[in-house]
Amino acid sequence: MTHEELIEHAQSDYNESRTVSKFGSLYFTTTGQHRMTLCKFLDLEKVTVQINEYTFDQEKFNAYQARKKFVKQLLDRGLISEELLESEIMSFEHGISLNIRGVFIMMGDQIFDGLINLYDGLSTNKVLITFESLIYGKPSTFNNDVRSQSDLLQFKYFLRKCKAELLSDV
């Protein structure tokens, strides 16, 4: 090929355009890599490309990290099964839906630490559990949407019951 034919080849779109992904100030070629390399070797100063720009969302990343930590804490305590897929647990914008010992619960992000602290501090006194079962009934009658500290306190009996069952399984 002549120099001009090489330039024309490097700048053509063929079946797909040259595409780069932009992360911050960095560009990564995603399609048309060979033609982009040819442009570089031909010392072309300008090349037309399609740019897919991605911005890092610190808030979403922090929420994801908090959820990941919370899920690990629940796993460590035996409250959820390792069989749950991360995509199933992390599916809502401001909370997660979990299957805790057979009961599905929607949990708000803001109560993660409170739930772990409450659970860790609970006693497994059988007399207290029997008394609370008379007051609160079966887990299916609970408010399964736990988003505040007051919701969490209403959820205390269920957590105490779970902890007692887990300790008796050992």
Image: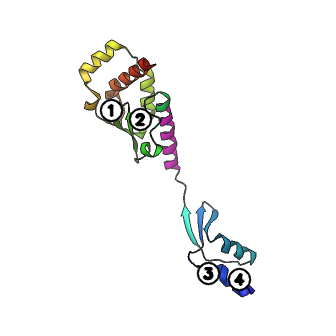
**Residue at position x 42%, y 38% from top?**
110
Q: Which residue is mark 1?
A: 151
Regarding mark 3 in the picture, which secondary structure is present there? loop
Residue annotated with mark 2:
111
155 versus 96 height, above or below: above
Circles 1, 2 touching at the beta carbon (< 8 Å): yes
In which quadrant of the rendered image does the N terminus lie?
Answer: bottom right
Q: Are marks 3 and 1 in contact (CB under 8 Å)?
A: no
Q: Range of the magenta residues?
A: 58-73
Q: What residue does disc 4 label? A: 6
Spatial separation of the CA atoms under disc 4 and disc 3: 10 Å
Residue at 29% x, 16% y is 130
Q: Is residue 40 magenta?
A: no
What residue did someone put label 3 on? 12
Upstream in the sequence, badge 4 or badge 2? 4
Q: CA distance from mark 3 to mark 1?
A: 61 Å
Is residue 146 at least partly visible in the picture? no
Is 64 a magenta residue?
yes
From the top left corner, tell me how far across and down residue 109 is, in percent. Answer: 42, 40
In-image side of 31 versus 147 (left or right): right
* Badge 3 or badge 1: first in the primary sequence: 3
